[in-house]
Structures are given as C-alpha cells and as structure tokens.
C-alpha cells in the first residue's frame, strides 16, 4: 500500500511509519511540527519508501499519485499541548478531518481516524465499551480535545454512510513508550523525568484516579490489524490493566531506584477523568488483538530511552 500518515512525526505517528515500512508499504508522513519532531523520523531519512511533507493538514492537501490509505493521526494529544493550543486542536479535529476525508474520497482510499478514550470524558460506565456515549463537558478546558475528536468521529461516519467511504476509527487509550516528548506534561514523561533527576514525583489530587497504560508497540499492532480489517465503527485499543496514579508512581520510583518519593498537589485541570479502563472485547473478537507488553517491561524500555535522551 501507499499510505499517508498525518501527524507522522509525532510520538505514535512515527512508530506507525516504522511499522508500515517494516510491512513493506510506502509511507508519506505529513506534519506541521507544532508538537511533532523531525527527531522522531530522522532514522527514516533516505529510505526509498518514505517521504516527509511539512504541512498543516487544515490546509488544502495535494498528494501526487495514488493512495491506498489515509491515516489521520495529527493532533495535539497531551493536556499541556491542547490547553496551550486550543484553537489548533479544534481545527485539526474539524478542518483537518474534513480535508483528509476529502483526499481519501478523491483517491478512493481507505480512511483511518485516530480517536481517543477522551470521547468518553469522565465516564459513568466502567470499563468503557464502544457503545458508551460518554460524559463530556463541551465548554470545559478539556472540551477542545474531547469534542474535536467526537466531531471527527461523527464526520467520518457521515462520509462512510453518505459517500460510502471505507473508514476505520480507533479509540486510543493512554499510550507510552520511546519518543514521547520530555516536556509534554503527560504522566509517564513527568514521572520518569522526575525520577531520573531523583526528584519527588508530583501526584495531582489524591492519586486514586486510574489509568490504563498501553505500550506503543502494542497500540501500533492493534492499529495495523484494524487498518486491515473490515470494521467501520469505533474500536477500543488499550490495556485493560488498570492502575491508580499512586500505584504507577510507586512503580516508576521502584524501577528507577528513585529516593525522592512522592509529593501531592491540588488537582491540575477541571473535568480530569477519575477512572479509565477500556473494554477490549471487540478488539479481541474481531482483530485477535490484546496487549503483549506488561506495564513493568514497557516502563523499563521507556526509562532506558529517557535515560539516553537526558544523558543520565
């Protein structure tokens, strides 16, 4: 296949580029680099089946030649990024989705949307199945990301139903691994960065809020399987192992031999989800997928990468 990946220089997008190239496909990565980095794809420079285009996907997209798939992964994804870039976040979810859908339709290509567990908001159903409609505050600070993705899902399904476009939607749960930005504000780089500096880990609130952490290789495997499937409606890809933030902090401290301990601060943002765990029954049934990398092993790999980046 010849595949366009928007957000291809991002954390997940760059790993997806690697997987598609490893499977023998040709990849065009598109990114405006407001949160992505060329460092993430520098190792692909000169690859005969890889091309990079610096462009904002909310503008008109021209790709010469055929495309077999358009995979829309462009978006600020960490709370720090989308709170600092609220308008860009809304635009890439709305205009970016519209532009990439139009391209896929023109090329008669398969379309793949990277959505998020944040469409479930602060859930009142646990664990979260794809049938759950969510509990989202549309005018809260996090709404710029949550509603951008919810709107994007609606537009994808409209193109599927009205234009008969061949579409896929993945709902991504908390993902971690090499190439995460050191300063993006998410819990993994926050904790690992603090631990490697022998600082206390900052836990917001009481630490009893939960998350389910998926190693990036597992996520990309699920995404690839979904791309090759015939499933058009949203599919959760995430790790059903649920940890409290306090448990996760203690694990990071243990794996890094960090003497700094933990400090507690007031909750950081309004509408922060208190629980998060995917129901992956659909992925197991339709894709034969479930995560293979235990959290402890994934964290060891991630810590090793951060150590190299930080020179410690």
Image: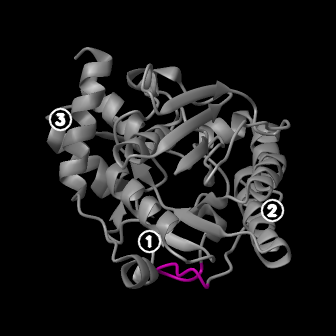
| In this view, the mark in front (1 or 3) | 1
**Residue that numbered label 3 is attached to:** 256
Residue 277 has which mark?
1
Q: Which of 74 and 306 is in front in this view?
A: 74
Q: Quadrant of the C terminus?
A: top left
Residue found 25% across the figure and 35% down from its top: 303
Q: Which of 211 and 72 is in front in this view?
A: 72
Mark 2, residues whose alpha carbon is within 10 Å: few (<14), some, or many (≥20)?
Answer: some
**Residue that numbered label 2 is attached to:** 138
- Is residue 254 depicted above or below 9 in this figure? below
| Cα–Cα span, label 2 and label 3 | 39 Å
First to last magenta residue range: 124-131
Residue 101 falls in image quadrant: bottom right
| Cα–Cα span, label 1 and label 2 | 22 Å
- Is residue 179 depicted above or below 138 in this figure? above
Is residue 22 shown left or right of residue 161?
left
Q: Does the magenta stretch include residue 128?
A: yes
Q: Tell me the element at label 1.
A: loop
Mark 1, residues whose alpha carbon is within 10 Å: few (<14), some, or many (≥20)?
Answer: many
Residue found 68% across the figure and 80% down from its top: 133
Residue 170 rendering spot, x and y as whole percentages: 56, 65
Is residue 88 shown left or right of residue 292?
right
- Is residue 286 depicted above or below 215 in this figure? below
Residue at the extreme top of the image, as rendered: 311
Which is nearer the N-term, disc 1 or disc 3?
Answer: 3
Q: Tell me the element at label 2.
A: loop
């Amino acid at each position: 296949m010849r595949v366009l990946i928007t957000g291809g220089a991002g954390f997940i997008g760059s790993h997806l580029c690697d997987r598609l190239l490893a499977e023998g496909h040709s990849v065009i990565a598109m990114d405006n680099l407001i949160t992505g980095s060329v460092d993430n794809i520098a190792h692909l420079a000169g690859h005969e089946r890889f091309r990079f285009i610096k462009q904002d996907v909310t503008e008109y997209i021209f790709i010469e030649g055929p495309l077999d798939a358009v995979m829309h992964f462009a978006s600020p994804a960490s709370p720090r990024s989308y709170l600092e870039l609220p308008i860009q976040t809304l635009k890439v979810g709305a205009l970016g989705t519209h532009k990439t859908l139009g391209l896929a339709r023109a090329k008669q290509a398969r379309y793949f949307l990277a959505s998020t567990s944040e469409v479930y908001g602060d859930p009142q159903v646990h664990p979260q199945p794809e049938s759950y409609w969510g509990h989202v505050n549309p005018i809260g600070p996090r709404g710029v990301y949550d509603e951008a993705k919810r709107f994007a899902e609606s537009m994808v399904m409209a193109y599927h139903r009205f234009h008969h476009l061949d579409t896929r939607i993945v709902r991504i749960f908390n993902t971690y691994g090499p190439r995460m930005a050191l300063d993006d504000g998410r819990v993994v780089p926050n904790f690992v960065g603090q631990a490697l500096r022998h600082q206390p880990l900052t836990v917001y609130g009481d630490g009893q809020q939960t998350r389910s952490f998926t190693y990036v290789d597992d996520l990309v495997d699920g995404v690839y399987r979904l791309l090759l499937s015939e499933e058009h409606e949203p599919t959760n890809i995430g790790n059903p192992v649920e940890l409290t933030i306090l448990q996760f902090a203690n694990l990071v401290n243990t794996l890094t031999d960090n003497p700094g301990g933990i400090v507690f601060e007031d909750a950081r943002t309004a509408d922060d989800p208190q629980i998060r765990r995917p129901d992956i029954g659909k992925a197991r049934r339709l894709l034969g997928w479930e995560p293979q990398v235990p959290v402890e092993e994934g964290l060891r790999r991630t810590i090793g990468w951060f150590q190299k980046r930080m020179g410690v």
